Image (cartoon, grey):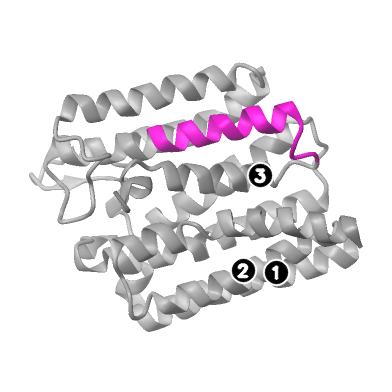
Amino acid sequence: MRGFPISSNLWVGLAVALLGLMSFPQPWSLEAIFYSFFLFFATISAYSYMRWVKIAQGNTGGQPHKIIGLKSDTLALAYAVLNGVLALSFLRFVFSPSLFWALIPALIVAVLYPLAFPNPNRHFTSLRTVPMLKLLLIALCWSWLSFGLPMIIIDQVWTPYLFGELAFRSLLVAGLTIPFDVRDIDYDSGRMRTIPQLIGIDRALQWSVFLLLIYEVWIIAAYFIFHLELDFCLAWLIGLELGALIIRKVKTDRSEWFIGFWVEGIPIFIFILYLLAQLAVGNY
């Protein structure tokens, strides 16, 4: 039962949704809430679909692939489809043509990413096997979905701060993703050439922490240059320091539970700190 939030993909869905919610200037507006619910269910659907494809292709490679304990492939696919329908039901409240076109690249990646295609040499190839592409796709997709699309929804004019945030958000997501490559190092194909495969586990985790530090420096700079709110900045700085401590522990604990709950939950912990910081600054 302890692993249910992970196997159901609820935990990762909540992490992405809250990351998106914090990107809105007014996170409690209806459009922010509706879009966050869309991200929540869309993430669950996408991750469940990816696990289902691995099961259907018999290409799990020893990786965690259970979907809320469902033994039937059909039921597992139904779970992914159900969450996809729920995602669309919330998307319609913030839908616009510009949002639709902005969603297309992420949708294409989500559909094609787990698929394996036969090539003339009778080997299997997929997007996952292109060296370093896995990290790049995840970083770009989640930074775009969690920050770029919220800016499109509110018709925000793109400023140097917004471009900077999108770029540094991509580095942050890359840093949060590296521990998952560390977890998967025992069964990832050598052709994928992930960061841990190239430089080893210890240095990969150091790079992960370093990328979090870069985002902290960006937050401090943005506070003074672009006048970000103090509670927002405090939540990110404290949360990322906590995140760095969690990532360092991956060196001694590469279990599915530790990485799937604690590392995946870093954006959730930051959001909780954001709520506490709002209360503290407000009372002050």
Image depth: mark 1 or mark 3 in front: 1
Identified by mark 1, the residue type is Leu
Identify which residue is drawn at 60% across, 30% down.
102
**To which quarter of the image does residue 77 belong?**
top left
Mark earlier in primary sequence (1, 3): 3
Is residue 260 on the magenta stretch? no
Q: Position of residue 58 (x, y in %)?
A: 11, 42
Identify which residue is drawn at 54% across, 58% down.
173
Residue at the spot of label 1:
237
Quick one: label 3, few (<14), some, or many (20+) residues within 10 Å? Answer: many
Q: Position of residue 34 (x, y in %)?
A: 64, 27
Q: Tell me the quarter of the image containing the C terminus.
A: bottom right
Residues in magenta, as a range = 26-45
Image depth: mark 2 or mark 3 in front: 2
Label 2 near label 1: C-beta < 8 Å? yes
Q: Relative to residue 124, is residue 77 depicted above or below?
A: above
Picture disc at residue 147 = 3
| Residue 118 visible, this angle | no
Distance from disc 1 to disc 2, alpha carbons, whole Å, reads 5 Å
Q: Is residue 249 left or right of residue 158?
A: left
**To which quarter of the image does residue 148 belong?**
top right
Residue at the spot of label 2:
240
Quick one: label 2, few (<14), some, or many (20+) residues within 10 Å? Answer: many
**Residue found farthest to the left:** 122
Identify which residue is drawn at 34% across, 78% down.
201
